[in-house]
């Protein structure tokens, strides 16, 4: 997971709690998701979920906990991996 040199946490989060978002890329288990093998597909490009938590990663970036409705998984995502989902 490569981060830019930008210190994202100097500003407000890009997304808010309960906001509906769509995944921009496939997310695989990097070993931090319990109970699933490394490489397991946790969420795929286009999956829709809701922001249920906002934390920080390496004192540099926000990490968004996204609950994906279809799988029931809650996965940590970076801003560059998400976009706002169309409402409706």
Image: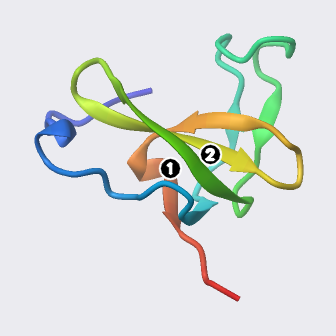
Q: Quadrant of residue 49?
A: bottom right
* Residue 72 location, quadrant: top right
Residue 57: where, in percent of width, then height? 35, 24
User: Tag 1 or tag 2, which sits nearer the N-term?
Assistant: 2
Q: Which mark is residue 66?
A: 2
Q: Is residue 18 left or right of residue 36?
A: left
Q: Do residues under tags 2 and 1 come within 8 Å of each other at their CB atoms? A: no
Residue 10 is situated, as x and y percent measured from the top left of the image, at 11, 40
Query: Mark number for residue 65?
Result: none
Residue at screen point 65% across, 35% down? 75
- The residue drawn where x is 77% and y is 21% is 39
Left or right, residue 35 beside residue 80: right
* SS at badge 1: helix
- Which residue is drawn at the image coordinates 78% and 35% (left, top)? 42
- Binning the other alpha carbons within 10 Å of mark 1 as few (below 14), some (14 to 19) or many (20 upward) gives some
Q: Which label was assigned to residue 81?
A: 1
| Outermost residue, bottom side | 88
User: From the viewer's perspective, is 70 left or right of 46?
Assistant: right
Mark count: 2
Secondary structure state at the residue bearing disc 2:
strand
Between marks 2 and 1 in the image, the one whose residue lies nearer the viewer? 2
Label 2 Cα crowd, 10 Å radius (few <14 / some 14-19 / many 20+)? many
Q: In the visual, does 51 lie left or right of 37? A: left
């Amino acid at each position: 997971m490569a981060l830019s040199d930008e210190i994202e946490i100097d500003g407000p989060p890009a997304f808010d709690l309960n906001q509906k978002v769509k995944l921009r890329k496939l997310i695989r288990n990097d070993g931090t998701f319990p109970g699933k093998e490394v490489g397991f597909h946790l969420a795929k490009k286009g999956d829709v979920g809701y922001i249920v938590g906002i934390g920080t990663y390496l004192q540099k970036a926000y990490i968004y906990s996204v609950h994906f409705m279809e799988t029931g998984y809650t996965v940590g995502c970076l801003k560059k991996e998400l976009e706002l989902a169309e409402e409706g």
